[in-house]
């Protein structure tokens, strides 16, 4: 084989590099930066403090009062937990 034919074979064997248009590269970088910012913001937005135990106790007491009124079939007591102009959006049949 001559030198020219060997060179021709090597050119056909080597894969051609795919060039990526500049616009696609910029879009990819912008998308990655946006994702990084969104993950960082959600991390900083998380609450660091614990809930006040008094609030948990108050909620448990309220739920107990509501369930007792409901289980006793006391419509007036259940209605007292709602505002005067409350509208029930969904209910079970």
Image: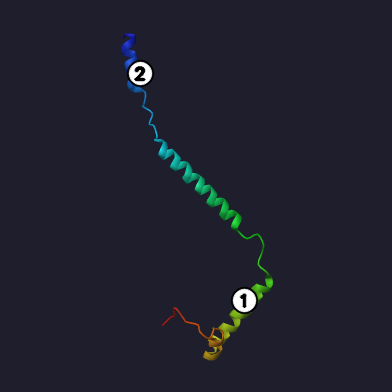
Give the secondary structure at mark 1.
helix
Residue 74 is situated, as x and y percent measured from the top left of the image, at 54, 90
55 and 73: which is toward the camera: 55
Residue 1 is situated, as x and y percent measured from the top left of the image, at 31, 9
- Marks 1 and 2, how far apart at CA: 77 Å
When the figure is inspected, residue 45 is found, relative to residue 90, above or below; the finding is above
Q: Is residue 85 left or right of residue 16?
A: right
69 and 11: which is toward the camera: 11
Can residue 14 be seen from the camera position used here?
A: yes
User: Residue at position x 50%, y 82% from top?
Assistant: 86
- Tell me which corner region of the image, top left, top right, bottom left or bottom right, holds residue 11: top left
When the figure is inspected, residue 44 is found, relative to residue 26, above or below; the finding is below
For disc 2, the marked residue is 10
Q: Is residue 38 left or right of residue 25?
A: right
Residue 48 is situated, as x and y percent measured from the top left of the image, at 65, 59
User: Residue at position x 68%, y 73% from top?
Assistant: 54
When the figure is inspected, residue 46 is found, relative to residue 32, above or below; the finding is below
User: Residue at position x 33%, y 13% from top?
Assistant: 6
- Tell me which corner region of the image, top left, top right, bottom left or bottom right, holds residue 82: bottom right
When the figure is inspected, residue 65 is found, relative to residue 26, above or below; the finding is below
For disc 1, the marked residue is 59
Q: Earlier in the sequence, mark 1 or mark 2?
A: 2
């Amino acid at each position: 084989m001559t030198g020219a034919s060997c060179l021709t074979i090597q050119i056909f064997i080597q894969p051609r590099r795919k060039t990526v248009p500049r616009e696609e590269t910029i879009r990819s970088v912008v998308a990655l930066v946006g994702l990084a910012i969104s993950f960082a913001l959600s991390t900083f937005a998380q609450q660091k403090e614990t809930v006040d135990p008094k609030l948990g106790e108050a909620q448990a007491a309220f739920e107990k009062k509501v369930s007792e009124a409901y289980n006793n079939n006391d419509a007036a007591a259940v209605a007292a937990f709602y505002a005067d102009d409350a509208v029930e959006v969904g209910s079970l049949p």
